[in-house]
Amino acid sequence: MRILLADDQRELLLLTADRLQRAGHTVVTAADGKAALAEIARAPFDIILLDEHMPELSGVEVLHAIRAKESGKRQVAIALTGYNTEPDQLRLLGEGFDSVLGKPFRLDQLDAILRSVLGSYALRSQPRSPSSATAPAGLLESVGGDKNLLLRMIRTFLRDTPKRLAQIATSIRRNKPEDLAAAAHALKGSVAIFGGNRAVQYCQELQELGRRRELTEAGRAFDLLKEEIAKVEENLRGYAGQTSHSASDAPRNRKRPGSDARRKPR
Amino acid sequence: MAAILVTDDDATTRQMVRGVLKKAGHEVATASDGMSALRAIQKRKFDLVLLDIWMPKMTGLGLLGHLHGERYIPKIVVMTSDQTSDTLLDALRGRVYQYLKKPLDATTLLTTVENAISTSPQVPAIEVISANTQWVELMVPCERSVVGRVQSFLMHIDVDLPPDIIEKVGYAFRELLNNAIEWGGHLDPNLKVRVSYIKTKKLLMYRLDDPGPGFRLEDLKHAAINNPVDNPMAHMQEREARGLRPGGLGLMLSQQLVDELVYNEKRNSVVLIKYL
């Protein structure tokens, strides 16, 4: 979920951003109303949290600006306010906020309000098909939004991963625990970038087996790792193909699935 | 713009870090193992080295050992996915500037790099008094950037604790260290705050001793903790009148986040405890 958090109180901004990031969200922060509007104009957000009193533009003014331009999908917006009496809440809901959170708030209050808003969000939005070739959530943001850099990284990953897997296979076959730990660690580093959580877990397992010099279980973990890596690779190939197709900036990736298919026996 | 050396044996990681830093305008060199990183550092002056720990030929920690005798040592940020306590404590002893957890993301990477290169080299180093997994004790200079740095190490020692405990304690610790540095040490890098971290089976404890004379709680009109019941915004008016940055919720939030928060008589030493 992409969340905008706008508040001029730095501690609250940091604490809340940290909380949301740990829950797996992508958080963009703004210290005043003008900056908040600029962020919204740059890219859409699933939820925005706006402080009522901010320099430049107040939370209400920001929300009015958003609502004025809204057509179709409604922006989910939560007000953060220091004045959290019932009349204040009603006033802010009347201004067009979906929910109101009084400051200072406890972390569990934030959790509860997000859960309720996220719940209603989930009902409104279309579920995504897990099998479609999408980059793991936040991947493009994790590289600063640079699509070409991401495509180059994917190419490097697809180029290097078979070598790393071969190193792991050799180290198990030749009973070399140090080599196994090193190769599994190296692969773990790159696969973690692309969010292959299970693959990371199996790399970790192989790395620990290597460090403990216990290779009897390594073959089983390696088989599981190969399966997971194949999924990550497939997903990335699909993403690279689609992205380079739409961006028409990396035509080499588009040929890859086709040329692979041609090599398959019929 | 800074000259930065990125050292990692994984090509994808090197490519990512290099790409993000170059786009931000930095000059970036790369090395794929500890040995070639050492050669690169000896050959030219880097402002910052981003260092992976587990690499072939020479580990990042091995490299730190080799740098010990060098006349010029660049600032070093360690990046690793294996945040074992021993690795972190070795990095801390090796005078590593900050610790960065993998997988990396562009925002954290850039923030850490900008902080590291903007900190003056004149700021005294963090002095390590004790560094075992149960007792870490540090003398830290009263300078803003030190808060994030100390936290990057201490908050990752306890990887086994539930994330919400790490987060709550982390927030309270950050607030108290900020107060100690700002109010106790007046942001004078030559003054030091003693930071102790102690972990037992049942509790996690931090103690901060600041170099200031202490304070009286009733004098903290700028903090929300002292607001009268009928005026929850009193501290904000006070801060505005005194030209202070917006804030003042720290002490109150901290008190809610940990189990015990105890001050000494002068209030220049504070202990925070979270029961496990």
Image (tube, rainbow, N blue to C red):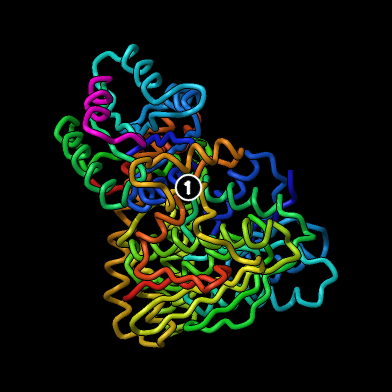
Query: Most prominent secondary structure in the magenta stretch?
Result: helix
> Seen in the image, is A76 located left or right of residue B16?
left
Residue A43 coordinates in the image, percent (x, y) = 42, 27
Q: Is residue A230 visible?
A: yes
- Magenta part of the protein: which range? A80-95
Task: Name the residue at 47% across, 32% down.
Answer: A251
Task: Name the residue at 21% across, 37% down.
Answer: A117
Q: Amino acid at mark 1?
A: Glu
Residue B64 coordinates in the image, percent (x, y) = 69, 74
Q: Is residue A93 magenta?
A: yes
On the image, numbered disc 1 is attached to which residue?
A11
The residue closer to the viewer here, A130 or A12, is A12
- Using the image, determine if residue B206 lies above or below residue A99: below
> Seen in the image, is B72 located left or right of residue A222?
right
- Using the image, determine if residue B155 lies above or below residue A2: below
- Using the image, determine if residue A10 lies above or below residue B198: above
Q: Which quadrant would the C terminus of chain B be assigned to in this image?
A: bottom left
The residue closer to the viewer here, A232 or A15, is A15
Q: Quadrant of residue A220?
A: bottom left
